[in-house]
Amino acid sequence: MTLSWRRLRPGRRASKELQLGEPADVEMELTIPNHFRCPISLDLMKDPVTLSTGITYDRQSIETWIEAGNLTCPITNQALTCLEPIPNHTILKMIQDWCVQKKSFGIERIPTPRIPITSLQVSEILSRITTAAASHGQKTDDCRDLVRKIKALTKESERNKRCVVASGTGSVLAAAFAALSSSQRQNVAVLEEILSALTLVFPLDGEACSYLGSAASLHCMVWFLESGDLSHRRNAALVLKESLSSDHQKIDALLEIEGALEALVKLIKEPVCPTSTKASLVVMYNMVTNNFTSSLSKDKIKERLVEMGLVSLLSEILVDAERSICEKALGVLDALCGSKGGREKAYHHALTMPVVVKKILRVSDLATEFSVSILWKLCKNEGREDGGVLVEVLQVGAFQKLLLLLQLGCAERTKDKATELLKMLNIHRERLECIDSTDFKALKRSF
């Protein structure tokens, strides 16, 4: 294989050549030795490894080959007896020496790559974590150091992360968290490290979620949501969302914990980061849309969330929220508007109608569906004879948007609600001139 480099000669020599009429730079060709090239990519190997068949490849190329489901050697076509390639230090040293010799051609020396972790090494660390977590607080420092080691290895490379996740790290860390949660105040440091490590190995499997769904684990996560610093609150919110999903029993158990709802609303009121806000909204959405067996019914949950001022908070964050947060916030607001208290709060908040109408056809199909559902609930259940809500919805341009939505097409359920809304709005349409909510250029300023 032949590669070309353009070597720039030193300044003094270059100027001299220019005076003599010679070119200052020269196109130079350099041939890479065949045994330094990867048989798959044909490029210079940066991390040579040898398979059980004795053939050497670049690590990235052969791992891509194996991950694609190929269990044979690309050159010999022999079955691989071991899928863990062995680093070829001899070839690597030869390549590095060759790079140093060709430094004048502009070739940089290839750095010595870090050897990726193996599944055997991960299993050994996880075994030690399990033993330390079962020591009833006697080896919490050892457990914390081992969890930190897992975190460092996971962050080191994508290959390491895949190996760590495939070795069942999520289940082991979740089991350790559940075991140490019974005495959370004595094990705060190690519990914080485990929460942080768990966020690196998403998605969690069913076994991990079952450990995190225990009463002790849920109490501990709520405690972190209430009293932890910003990073710990974020990690607790992410792990809580990942472990609960839409499991009714776990959500029931969470609702029984004092301060759980307040902690989730606090993440909306005092946001830590977009990811924690999304996680909190997902958990609350599951709370207000699923059927429960706990002492709190859906209506009671909605009433408590409304009393905490969630309707106002959602109306305010919808003004400039990103797509994902917008969809989740509209979903929760739609559920809250299914209660009388939620609708009353929405009626009295100046932003609710304009911001909900604005989201129709501007964010996503899901956001449009939620927005139409919110307007339908607010307009259909209005108790005022003068149709004040309908007039307000007309003023912010809902009629035009709903017509456009029917023309463009939407889900059948949304179509039915939009049609019913148009019929209700049409009665009051002649009373005022509609204003397009998306165009404020014609409005005159007071000054």
Image (cartoon, grey):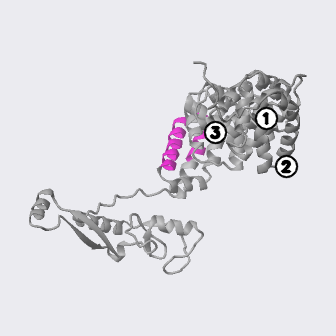
Is any part of residue 62 visible from this angle?
yes
98 on left or right of 327: left
Q: Amino acid at mark 3?
A: Leu
Magenta segment includes 235: no
307 on left or right of 60: right
Say which residue appears at 77% left-offset and 45% top-offset.
405
Mark 2 vs 1, N-terminal side = 1
Q: Which residue is mark 1?
A: 334
Q: Which numbered dot is residue 238?
A: 3
Mark 3 vs 1, N-terminal side = 3
Nearer to us of marks 2 and 3 is 2
Q: Position of residue 4 (x, y in %)?
A: 30, 70
Q: Is residue 375 above or below residue 445?
A: below
Q: Secondary structure at mark 2?
A: helix
Nearer to us of marks 2 and 1 is 2
Q: Secondary structure at mark 1?
A: helix
Q: Which numbered dot is residue 412?
A: 2
Instruction: Specify the segment rendered in magenta.
Output: 128-155
Q: Position of residue 50 (x, y in %)?
A: 44, 70
* Magenta stretch, main secondary structure class: helix
* Quadrant where the image shows the N terminus: bottom left
Q: Secondary structure at mark 3?
A: helix
Q: Amino acid at mark 2?
A: Glu
